[in-house]
Image: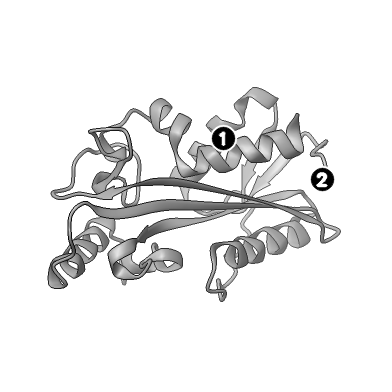
């Protein structure tokens, strides 16, 4: 496994919430973190049907264009009763002509569960795949999962995305009600980051 020895890491995202989460998870290592958005890099088209495939597209595109080691995250919520949907289309469900509307996406998820009278608890999991890519084409892959259930109505204004309808196993509050520090200790992204840190940083 290749070690990260540089002092600057490019995070291949245009999502400010995701960048802030990743920055907090890496702040112990005195690494300068810069986003693809800050460098004006384009967002590549995500054409794969898996988290790992799309994360690889983003990481390698950013590394090639910038000459920096790039870290990309592809993540989403997979709802069992919906056959794993929205999955890799988690963000797509929120797309509107005026930007992303995650309240609309959460309402769609619940509406589809209601339409099939899905049994309770409505099991789901947040998945995160991290790909760290070097400009020479090498990459390392780390996957994390947080199991839980979809609940309704939406609860909490913390976090981002589908957090207000996801209640992680072992907790009686949603990610949307959870302080950022607590979520960052237990989330799917934290699980993947623990593996990344063990593999590439320590």
Location of the C terminus by quadrant is top right
Looking at the image, tell me whether mark 1 or mark 2 is earlier in sequence order: 2
Q: Is residue 191 left or right of residue 10?
A: left
Q: Is residue 56 left or right of residue 86?
A: right
Name the element at disc 1: helix
Image coords of residue 16 (percent x, y): 46, 46
Image coords of residue 105 (percent x, y): 26, 62
Q: Is residue 99 above or below residue 45?
A: above
Separation of residues labelled 1 and 2 (CA atoms): 22 Å
Residue drawn at (75%, 38%), measured in percent from left and top? 200
Q: Is residue 73 above or below residue 91?
A: above
Location of the N terminus by quadrant is top right
- Dividing the picture into quadrants, the one containing residue 118 is bottom left
Q: Which mark is residue 96?
A: none
Image coords of residue 3 (percent x, y): 82, 39
Q: Is residue 149 above or below residue 24?
A: below
Residues at discs 1 and 2 in contact (Cβ within 8 Å): no
In the image, 41 versus 30, the foreground residue is 30
In the image, farthest residue toward the right: 136
- The answer to whether any part of residue 166 appears in the image is yes
For mark 2, does the 10 Å Cα neighbourhood hold few (<14), some (14 to 19), or many (20 or more) residues?
A: few
Q: Is residue 202 above or below residue 70?
A: above
Of tags 1 and 2, the one toward the viewer is 2
The residue at which mark 2 appears reads as 1
- Dividing the picture into quadrants, the one containing residue 199 is top right
Residue drawn at (21%, 51%), measured in percent from left and top? 121
Q: Which mark is residue 23?
A: 1
């Amino acid at each position: 496994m290749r070690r990260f020895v540089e002092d600057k890491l490019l995070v291949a995202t245009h999502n400010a919430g995701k960048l802030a989460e990743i920055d907090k998870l890496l702040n112990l290592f005195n690494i300068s973190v810069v986003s693809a958005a800050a460098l004006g890099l384009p967002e590549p088209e995500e054409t794969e049907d898996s988290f790992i495939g799309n994360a690889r597209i983003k990481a390698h595109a950013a590394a090639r264009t910038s000459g920096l080691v790039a870290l990309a995250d592809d993540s989403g919520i997979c709802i069992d009763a919906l056959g794993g949907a929205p999955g890799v289309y988690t963000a797509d469900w929120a797309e509107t002509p005026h930007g992303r509307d995650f309240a609309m996406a959460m309402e769609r998820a619940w509406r589809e569960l209601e339409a099939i009278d899905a049994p309770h608890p409505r099991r789901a999991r947040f998945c995160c795949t991290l790909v760290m890519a070097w400009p020479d084409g090498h990459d390392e892959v780390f996957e994390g999962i947080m199991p839980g259930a979809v609940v309704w109505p939406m609860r909490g204004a913390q976090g981002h995305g589908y957090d207000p309808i996801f209640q992680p196993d072992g907790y009686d509050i949603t990610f949307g009600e959870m302080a950022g520090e607590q979520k960052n200790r237990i989330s799917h992204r934290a699980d993947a980051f623990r593996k990344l840190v063990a593999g590439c940083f320590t």
